[in-house]
Image (cartoon, rainbow, N blue to C red):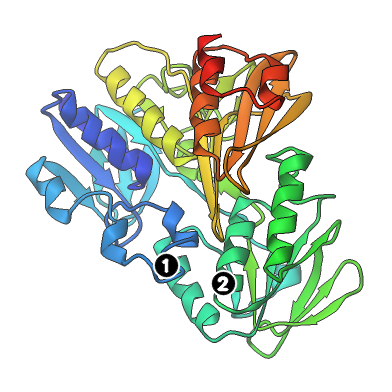
Amino acid sequence: MRHIVIIGAGQAGAALAARLRALGFDGAITLIGQEVAPPYQRPPLSKAYLLGEMEEQRLYLRPAGWYTDNDITLRTDTTAVAVDPVTRTVTLETKEVLTYDHLALTTGARPIALPESIAGNLWGVLTIRTLGCADGMAPYLEKGGKTLVVGGGYIGLEAAAVAAKKGLDVTLVEQAPRILQRVAAPETSDYFRDLHQSHGVTIKENCGLTSLSGDQYAAHAVLSDGTDLDIDSCIVGIGIQPNTELAESASLDIDHGIATDEMGRTSDPYIWAAGDCASLEVRGQRMRIESVQNAIDQAEAVAANMLGADTPYQPKPWFWSDQYDIKLQIAGLNTGYDEVLVRQGDKPGAVSHWYFGKGQLLAVDAMNDPRAYMIGKRLIEAGRTPDRAALTDGTELKTLLAA
């Protein structure tokens, strides 16, 4: 191979380029990103960066000079508009055409926006996914006032926590019967509902946003339960959708994202995908794993398979979320769980929720309990299931590994 092109300069794209060089690939690598900034980490955007605890430079995954030093052509502020798998070319917005031997799509995902019928074209309707989004949100958080958060997933809850810590009056609405319904057990939902309410956040479940109005800026919100709120901003966190447009232009298979096989290859033998845009089969179900860890691991697996490793990617998911003084760490995937056990931690306020499906340990949610997280993660990765009684009777967690 003479030239590998990577479209998408996020966590997955940067990891893939770095891994190619680490594995000894000495051909040309072009990494294309739409944003002006070099590849950076996204999780702090809704946490430390918004709180002013992290500067932009600290977000960067690598110093700018690293790409030059490693002979990687990093093209920021550049948009790819089409892929032709027959000629193996990528067309840029500037009409420039790049030829590739192998192509990786690490195009990520974008926030799902409110329908125009609800949001109109009002200012102050905010999402958080990119550095630009966070920078645009910051002034609204600094001036105080009232904010409405739409969506009770982790992004919405993290944004609500930042807004509350900034002193804003926060109302969060979730259309489902409970917050975190799509991703967590009722026990975890209860924990975080209580946490946010203890910090003054008003949480309305089984409640959606009907309309926004105002003179240029969002100033009034009507909720589905009839509530009329005066607001200064509206933060939208109702999920993300994969960026599959380039894959579609190349007629690749799309199934909950850009469909890949166990090697990370798409339906075209010379095109690969990794990260939030890519779907893979896990436990007989096709899904996308939306996490930094998966983006890195999957991208590194794709890099190796591009170079002939022929090694199936086996995800070992873990996630985290910071809200107030609580660190949530999640190991595994709880898909298909039918039982949840609650274990109190060794320190005050520490607790973990252990998910089982058909008798097998699937996942662990650990709140301020890093030991439970680490033990649970090791058990899950080893395919082992601990004794249920030992989990809840105060047995030392380390003994579960030896059992």
Q: Residue at x 34, y 33 (%)?
A: 104
| Residue farthest toward the left in the current orientation of the protein | 69
Percent x, y of residue 310: 34, 10
Question: Is 296 or 92 nearer to us in this picture?
Answer: 296
**Label 1 secondary element:** helix
Q: Is residue 117 left or right of residue 93?
A: right
Position of residue 366 measured from the top left corner of the image (x, y, whole percent):
59, 38
Residue at image mark 1: 132
Q: Quadrant of the N terminus?
A: top left
Hey, which quadrant is residue 132 in on the image?
bottom left
* Percent of width and height locating residue 66: 14, 47
User: Which of pointers 1 and 2 indicates the residue nearer the eye?
Assistant: 2
Reply above or below: 125 against 114. Answer: below
Q: Nearer the viewer, residue 222 or 194?
A: 194
Q: Are the two marked residues, 1 and 2, in contact with CB atoms closer than 8 angstroms?
A: no
Q: Which mark is residue 306?
A: none
Q: CA distance from mark 1 to mark 2?
A: 21 Å
Q: Earlier in the sequence, mark 1 or mark 2?
A: 1
Q: Residue at x 56, y 24 (%)?
A: 397
Neighbourhood count class around disc 1 (C-alpha, 10 Å): few under 14, some 14–19, many 20 upward: some
The amino acid beneath tag 2 is Lys
| Viewer-closest of 249 and 283 | 283
Q: Kindly identify the amino acid type of the residue bearing the numbered disc 1.
A: Gly
Q: Which mark is residue 165?
A: 2
Q: Residue furthest right?
A: 226
